Amino acid sequence: MEDIVKVGDIIDVTVTGIQAYGAFALLPDHSSGLIHISEISDKFVRSIDNFVHIGESITVKVIDIDDSTHQAKLSLKALQPTARRKMKRALKHQREKIVETPSGFQPLKDQLTHWITQGLHIKEEEK
């Protein structure tokens, strides 16, 4: 028998059934688990069939195990980089590249009065 599955493990499972609320799976230790619809994807899940199919082998993360039933709660989306995480990485990368000029905000300060005056003139012309 395979090693017992633990919370936090990343494992390959076989999809054994699909319901409107989630997909059932057979784990390597021959126990069962459920990938709830909310753990399928960060995107809107209209139909679980659009993401997994019965008999398919997929990689999931074990996010919990029910002590009384020994059934695992599984997640597909925990292994997918979310848009938020991608954005965070992109912003961090951008921040690393920004180098302040020696003049700092001074050029903006020098132009501010001109821009305000110009904006007021445009608004008066629109009237």
Image: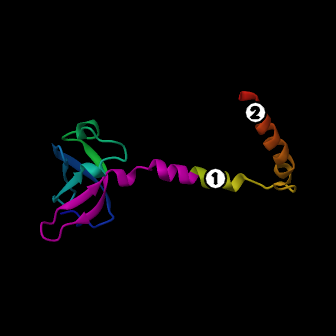
Read off the residue under disc 1: 93
Number of numbered callouts drawn: 2
Asked if residue 5 can be seen in this view, the reply is no
Q: In the rendered image, which quarter contains the N terminus? A: bottom left
- Residue 48, placed above or below residue 104: above
Q: Residue 101 shows which numbered tag?
A: none
Label 2: state its secondary structure: helix
Between the C-alphas of marks 2 and 1, the distance is: 43 Å
Please, which residue is most extreme toward the bottom here?
A: 67
Please report the bounds of the magenta region as a residue range.
60-89
Q: Position of residue 117 (x, y in %)?
A: 82, 41
The three-letter code of the residue at mark 1 reads His
Q: Nearer the viewer, mark 2 or mark 1?
A: 2
Q: Position of residue 73 (x, y in %)?
A: 23, 59
Label 2 or label 1, whichever comes before in sequence order: 1
Label 1: state its secondary structure: helix
Q: Position of residue 55 (x, y in %)?
A: 19, 41
